[in-house]
């Protein structure tokens, strides 16, 4: 069974992530898994204490540190269980039917990759538990998940409501074409008006690409408004989004290598950081 997986960490966005995941699971007719990863936080200790204290005292201190580490692990597990139970109650009130709780040790990205074959969609919050709601950044896992996972990622950026329309940021490249194909084949956004937008020069080649993408979506039942708008990518897309009251944006992720991103930046990351609506990221 292919599942929707919601990444729950107890942060201020957890309820919004849960709401978004319940909506997505209902749209896709898929079971929902609430996932919490127990990521071990490093504790700074001196590896060699023999130079400052005696051997017996050193061994006693190391025993104390081991016991403390075990206690931390137990408390983290119990805390994670409470986080998941709270999310479960919230999800059920939001209408979740097929629901499973899953707590795993280890890195979140590694856990998601391990579950990938059973995953249809990943839902995450833009900010993690160590950020405030108004932080002008993205959580540390977002880019790693987007670069490594083959599954679509729905990013919640604030209070989630079921969207009444959506916009696809399209540039005619391979990542964008893959995004169009996956959206066309998925029930997630079916029935919602679609705005298909290219930023930049209106050439014959780009118009041909846009028309092909529009046709593919229309063949799957989407009502599509397609536009090529002169201007820089980020400013053009955000202006169109605001003027047309777009409620969800979809885009292909990270079309450039890390080296190229270092020099020219990433429109994907910038859109995630600045967006005030949910984003659907596809590779």
Image: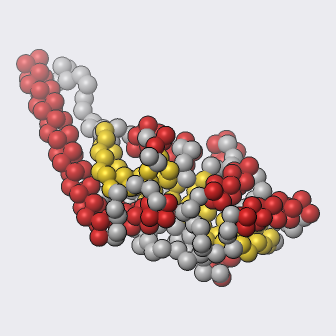
127 w.r.t. 192: above or below: above
192 w.r.t. 81: above or below: below
76 w.r.t. 209: above or below: above
What residue sits 44% from the left and 37% below the top?
Answer: 114
Q: Does residue 8 appear in this view? A: no
- Horizontal and vertical percent position of residue 172: 78, 56
Q: Is residue 200 left or right of residue 85?
A: right
Q: Which image quarter: residue 268?
A: bottom right
Q: How many marks?
A: 0
Nearest to the observer: residue 126 or residue 111: 111
What residue sits 60% from the left and 72% below the top?
Answer: 191
- Horizontal and vertical percent position of residue 139: 45, 54
> Which residue sits furthest right?
204
Q: Which image quarter: residue 148?
A: top right
What residue sits 44% from the left and 64% below the top?
Answer: 26
Q: Which image quarter: residue 103?
A: top left
Q: Is residue 58 left or right of residue 264?
A: left
What residue sits 44% from the left and 50% below the top?
Answer: 3
- Horizontal and vertical percent position of residue 239: 67, 76
- Horizontal and vertical percent position of residue 189: 57, 66
């Amino acid at each position: 069974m292919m599942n929707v997986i919601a990444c729950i960490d107890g942060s201020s966005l957890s309820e919004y992530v849960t709401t978004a995941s319940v909506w997505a699971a209902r749209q896709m007719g898929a079971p929902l898994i609430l996932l919490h990863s127990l990521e071990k936080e490093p504790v700074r200790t001196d590896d060699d204490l023999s130079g400052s204290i005696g051997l017996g005292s050193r061994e006693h201190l190391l025993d104390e540190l081991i016991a403390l580490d075990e206690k931390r692990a137990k408390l983290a597990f119990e805390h994670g269980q409470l986080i998941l139970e709270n999310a479960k109650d919230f999800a059920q009130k939001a209408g979740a039917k097929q629901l499973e709780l899953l707590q795993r040790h280890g890195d979140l990205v590694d856990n998601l990759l391990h579950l990938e074959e059973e995953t249809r969609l990943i839902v995450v919050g833009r900010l993690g538990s160590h950020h405030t709601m108004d932080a002008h950044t993205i959580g540390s896992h977002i880019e790693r998940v987007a670069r490594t996972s083959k599954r679509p990622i729905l990013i919640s950026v604030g209070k989630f409501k079921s969207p009444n329309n959506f916009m696809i940021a399209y540039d005619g490249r391979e990542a964008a074409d893959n995004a169009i194909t996956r959206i066309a084949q998925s029930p997630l956004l079916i029935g919602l008006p679609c705005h298909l937008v290219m930023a930049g020069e209106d050439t014959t080649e780009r118009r041909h690409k846009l028309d092909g993408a529009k046709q593919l979506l229309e063949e799957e039942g989407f009502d599509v408004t397609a536009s090529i708008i002169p201007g820089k990518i980020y400013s053009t897309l955000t202006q169109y989004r605001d003027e047309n009251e777009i409620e969800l944006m979809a885009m292909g992720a990270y079309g450039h290598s890390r080296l190229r991103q270092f020099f020219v930046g990433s429109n994907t990351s910038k859109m995630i950081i600045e967006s005030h609506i949910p984003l659907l990221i596809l590779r």
